[in-house]
Amino acid sequence: MNKNAIWGIIGLMSIALIGIIALQAYWINERLRLEKTHFDNLVFSVLNRVAEKLEKDEEKRTTQMIWNVENLTGGLLHPSESIGSQSSADIGVGLDFFSRRHRFDTLGYGSNHTNTLECNCMVCRKERFETSAWMHEQWLTKQLIDPDPIEERIRVELLDSYFKQELLNMNVNLEYSYGVYSHGKKAFVIRDGKYNYVPGDDDFGSQAVSIPNIDDLPKDNKELSNSKYFVQLFHHSSTLEAPPGYLVIHFPGMAGYVWGTVMSTVIAAILFTGIILFCFIYTIQVIFTQKKLSKIKSDFINNMTHEFKTPIATISLASDSITSPMISGNPEKVQRFANIIKQENRRMNKQVEKVLQMALLDKNDFQLKLTKVDAHEVIRQAVNNINLRAESKGGKAEAILGASNSFIEVDLTHFSNVVNNLLDNAYKYSPDNPEIIVTTENKSNGINIKVKDNGIGMSKDDLKHIFDKFFRVHTGNLHDVKGFGLGLSYVKAILDAHKGHISVKSDLGKGSEFTLFFPFISNS
């Protein structure tokens, strides 16, 4: 798959993912809007029901007051009854009743009756009914024209109980604050079950002893004043342009309550979107990794072809030479070409062995044959071999073996391959006058082996990948560096198998230094 196709697929997947996220956000927002609307409807239903109950309470108190006045009027007809303790409002209504009753007597109704309240005849009963209706009409007229202050028309204990009961009925279990706003005073006169004025000592319907100046009232709660949840109070019993007041409620935790109703949906949406996003990112990484591996494997095949092509060509040439009549009769030349064939064959075997070793390491299908090995002996032999090659380029290789205890438990073959691989890399990547130094030192539970060179070095980006399979450092104008890119990945795998570790320091143009650590006793 080419690069443009990959980016095209990524673009389409990105658009689809963004579309899914946008749709989820839209539906969650729509769900929130519906939940808010539902909550608003519940709250306004509660407010309307409470307001209705307050109006019904007032009607009941009015009826009771009228009956109280009738009883009072009955007392006015008997001089023995005292009227000094009655309120002026009740006395006024009572006198009206008395004059009305006197008018009934003048017209001939009840002329034989001294007390219509005690009489149960048709005339007295009719008089009492008509008088009560007339008094109720007079009271309603007064409320329409000149209503009592709204705070005197509400009992706070009943208001508080109404709110609790109605909210409970609507399954609204939230903290709240409420208040009664007086249009006349431009302030809240009742808040959270308390009066913001001093009520009178008489019955609830009586006039308050004193009402503080509006400026002395507590400052209106900002949240309560700005609440959108309010309804009119006693708007049916007033002819004023504005209602006597408003019943207001505020829920501080309303936003959290509404969000709580959709939180499970939000969490599920985030979870599943996160899974899709993770799979999307992971898929992209896999695509690019596979593309990179494909390129690396192609390079590996090309390198392997060239690595095998040279010895095969050499072997073919040597074989043809041996079969030539001019060479076959000369034993020395035959021996020379035979050695060349043997040497190139050994070289091919080593390359094949590297590939097979890496296949075994990938499958973890290999067994270490641990023996006690003198690391210094293996290092000296490897340094001597590489020194011959380094001298041909005007360089040198030397060993500075400072470890006092050089015996470690390792697989001799793999350990030897590791040392030789590092020395071979140091030589290959040091084009002119190579200087290779191998040092050893003891650690508390093992030995450090350092291989330092003055070669071309590596960049920081290369250092991140040098232990990856098939990875080869870019050599610039240096074209004679051969290999499969398996050497360092093999070295790291062997170190891991021996419970050791490897690290590297390198600067471009200044060379590299590899540090190997092998424990004295491997627990593999």
Image: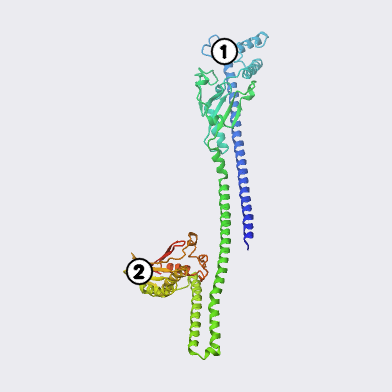
Outermost residue on the left side: it is 404
| Residue 465 vs residue 216, the one in the foreground | 465
User: What's the residue at 57%, 13% (across, down)?
Assistant: 91
Q: Secondary structure at mark 1?
A: helix
- Count neighbours of disc 1 (C-alpha within 10 A) and say few if under 14, some if 14 to 19, many if 20 or more: some
Which secondary structure, mark 2?
A: strand
- The residue where tag 2 is placed is 400
Badge nearest the viewer, 1 or 2: 2
Count of numbered circles on the image = 2
Q: Residue furthest bottom?
A: 329
The percent position of residue 287, horizontal first and vertical second, equals: 58, 61
**Above/below status of 141 relative to 48:** above
Image height check: is 280 above or below 496? above
Q: Type of residue at label 2?
A: Ile
Label 1 to label 2, Cα distance in Å? Answer: 125 Å
Q: Give the residue displayed 54% in from the left and 71% down from the top.
A: 303
- Picture coordinates of residue 439, whole percent (x, y): 37, 67
Whichever of labels 1 and 2 marks the residue nearer the N terminus, that label is: 1
Is residue 270 at least partly visible in the picture? yes
Q: Nearer the viewer, residue 324 or 35?
A: 324
Q: Which residue is mark 1?
A: 91
Is 387 on the left or on the right of 352, as rendered?
left
Image quarter (top left, top right, bottom left or bottom right) of the C terminus:
bottom left
Callout 1 amino acid: Ile
Residue 369 appears anywhere in the view: no
Instruction: State the image coordinates of residue 294 (x, y, percent, origin top left).
Output: 57, 66
Position of the N terminus, as image quadrant, is: bottom right
